[in-house]
Image: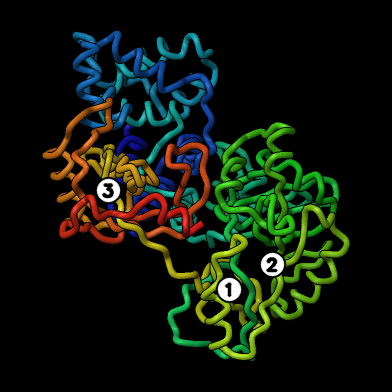
Amino acid sequence: MRAFSQLLDGLVYTRSRNGKLDLIAHYMATAPDPDRGWALAALTGNLDLKAVKASAIAEMARSRTDPVLFEMSRDYVGDLAETVALLWPKPEGQPEELDDGSLTLSALVDRLHATSRAAAPTVLAQMMDHLDASGRFALLKLATGGLRVGISARLAKTGFAQAFNLDVDDVEECWHALTPPYAALFAWAEGRAPRPDPAGTPFFRPFMLAHPLEADSVDLTDYAAEWKWDGIRIQIVGTGAETRLYSRAGDDITGSFPDIAQAFGSHAVLDGELLVRGEFQGGEAASFNALQQRLGRKAVSAKMMEDYPAFVRLYDILIDGEEDLRALPWAQRRARLEATVPTLDPHRFDISALIEAPDFESLAELRAGARDAAIEGVMLKRRDSPYVAGRKAALWYKWKRDPLTADCVMMYAQRGHGKRSSFYSDYTFGCWTEEGELLPVGKAYSGFTDEELKWLDRFVRGNTVNRFGPVREVEKTLVLEVAFDSIHESKRHKSGLAMRFPRIARIRRDKPAHEADRIAGLRRLL
């Protein structure tokens, strides 16, 4: 357990991607089985310990410490697991950690798996009594399932691959045929067994990705242009008997969109954009806000599927039956896709149309009007490009539309997580109504430098007018220029609006708050 807790500490405080990869690789190469398998499951979000809830951990801490001290400390630290780990009182005469080996990572996971929800707080407390602060932090992060140590599932798999000199795409292709603690995966990595064979299962293939377009133009005789839709990239994998849906990160999202999976009975692998059909524009794609109503749900009701009917706008075909098409040039794959689409349910699948433009200048004019119909920009694909995993130079480009901006007033601030847990780094901001009321229109926690973060944190601390747990209300005096991709109707916000991908573009210390933008101006962007 000590090695795993040291890994988490290292990941929290290491900023560079390569540094994080080195930490993961070292742990995977040196930790014993099955500890490292459970660690890999936790880092990739595949460890599900249903018995322990955050509310139970907070109550457990209140029973062992002064409740007022706990609440004040939690407000200051900003992270439940870190607060409890630091405050937890060690029983008098109790050693920091047992020497009998019972507190290995695998032993902890086994015990938590076997624990009922009612007994979980008692069991957790007993284990925490035998751990130091670092070990308690790791245990609580494991128990709640929210590691938040600054890595993605892909980065964890990349670190594993680095440990054993494997190609991470090879790991991805067999990943969904495996279950924790991944004994077969480690046996293959160490040369003790062949690579796990996912054949016969609807397994994930790594996506081909695009570089942002930085050149002034491209030759449209070499590149085909199509719209970049504002949904989420999805892979549909069908064996003829079973269909699974995967996100770009390789997450299985079939449970959120069973209507799509049920409508696909082909033996094929397709790449496309998952969208929700809108009420207007002849049933075209609705905004991303509509799709968000279904994202992240493990199950959806019939009413949810009726209110937000999903469909897929197809981009590419990777596998057709038993034939792997990825090595073929894009133009040939496109022809195969065009032949496949008429065989699919037209209510659930269509094809992303190519943009007819005689030259790049004409394409630029079309892109300038690309805020309608859930369009996010333009994709440029070399006509002779194979379908290869990751981003390969000069094959595919994404040419996103320019962001919108608005001058907004900071209203609330909340502490961040991990390395930002001591800073107020999450900002809620608003715009004015015609009557002079400030209403929230978005929340952002990116776009600023480390130095700007320190300045913003000082502003929040020096201008707090009210506190609500970890949230501070501030004087309505600071204007933030916010960049965002689009804006949509939203019933969840009093303003009736929600921004897509908001981020802080500039801190407008020069601008009086009363000169910030109006809700009416944002509404005109709709």
445 vs 390, nearest the viewer: 445
Amino acid on which the number 2 mark rests in the picture = Tyr
The reply, left or right, for residue 112 in relation to residue 204 is: left
State how far apart marks 3 and 2 are (Cα).
40 Å
Residue sitting at the far front: 435
The reply, left or right, for residue 293 in relation to residue 463 is: right
The residue depicted at 61 percent of the width and 78 percent of the height is 381
Above or below, 209 relative to 355: above
Q: Is residue 281 visible?
A: yes
Q: Is residue 195 visible?
A: no
- Circle 3 SS class: strand
- Circle 2 SS class: strand
Q: Residues within 10 Å of mark 1 (few under 14, many from 20)?
A: many
Q: Position of residue 242 (x, y in %)?
A: 80, 45
Mark 3 or 1: the one toward you:
3
Residue identified by numbered label 1: 379
Q: Which mark is residue 315?
A: 2
The reply, left or right, for residue 460 in relation to residue 354 is: left
Residue identified by numbered label 3: 409
Amino acid on which the number 1 mark rests in the picture = Met
Quarter-wise, where is residue 144 in the image? Answer: top left
Above or below, 355 relative to 65: below
